[in-house]
């Protein structure tokens, strides 16, 4: 994966921090980009997972925040300093939305462009794959706990949205876990006895 794509992922993650806690996928996107050179496949998968989680927040809320903010700014011109601050704030939301969308497209393009796996036969000398494994364990535990809360919310209040969101995120986390396990078995088979 190119350094430019990893830099784009880091920028998208950093700018998305403006969305706060709901943009927790930014951490995984940045972490995946950081470890990818020394943990090629797991780093790439962690970037994909982070991009998916981040996209659900940023692309789901970013355009609405930007359009509503612009509409509100065009209607009020009370304080010039406040207007400039608001425009800077909205610009950050716009930049985050554009960077996340650009990163998603770049990651998809990279996946489509890669005709063969360029990973070396063995692991890099100082592999950072352990970082991806720690993230996978933490995400699995978090996902399981979130699903329990979503099921409770559904049973008590009939809220279907958290349940469906939880199922989608859990499916992505499960796919990440399975990919890491399969990768570990394949790497073990490639090692000389």
Image (spheres, rainbow, N blue to C red):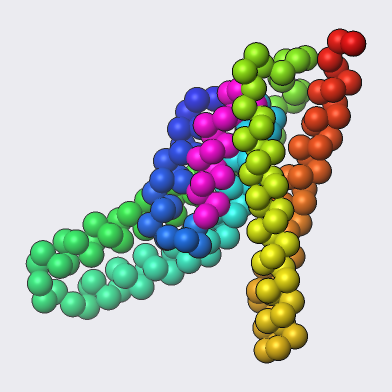
Give the residue drawn at x 76%, y 45%.
177
Give whichever of 90, 172 is nearer the camera. 172
Image location of residue 115, percent across then percent down: 74, 25
Residue 133 in sight: yes
In-image side of 187 versus 23 (left or right): right
Q: Nearer the viewer, residue 7 or 115?
A: 7
Left or right of 24 in this view: 141 = right
**Does residue 172 appear in the picture of this structure?**
no
Task: Judge by depth and name the residue closer to the eye, 33 or 97.
Answer: 33
| Residue 15 percent coordinates (x, y) | 39, 49
Quarter holding the N terminus is top right
The picture quadrant where one finds residue 79 is bottom left
Q: Where, quadrant-wise, is the C terminus in this rendering?
A: top right
- Range of the magenta residues? 24-39
**SS majority, magenta:** helix
Tell me if 127 is positioned left or right of 88 in this view: right
């Amino acid at each position: 994966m190119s350094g430019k794509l990893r830099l784009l992922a880091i920028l998208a993650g950093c700018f998305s921090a403006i969305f706060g806690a709901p943009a927790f996928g930014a951490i995984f996107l940045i972490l995946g980009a950081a470890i990818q050179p020394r943990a090629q496949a797991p780093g790439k998968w962690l970037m994909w997972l982070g991009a998916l989680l981040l996209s659900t927040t940023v692309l789901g809320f970013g355009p609405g925040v930007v359009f509503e903010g612009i509409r509100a700014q065009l209607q009020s011109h009370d304080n010039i300093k406040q207007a400039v601050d608001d425009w800077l704030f909205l610009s950050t939301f716009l930049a985050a939305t554009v960077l996340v969308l650009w990163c998603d497209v770049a990651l998809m393009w990279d996946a489509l462009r890669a005709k063969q796996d360029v990973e070396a036969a063995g692991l890099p000398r100082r592999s950072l794959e352990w970082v991806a494994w720690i993230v996978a364990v933490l995400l699995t535990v978090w996902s399981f706990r979130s699903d329990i809360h979503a099921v409770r919310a559904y049973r008590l209040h009939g809220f279907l949205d958290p349940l469906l969101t939880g199922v989608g995120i859990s499916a992505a986390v499960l796919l990440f876990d399975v990919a890491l396990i399969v990768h570990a078995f394949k790497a073990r088979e490639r090692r000389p006895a």
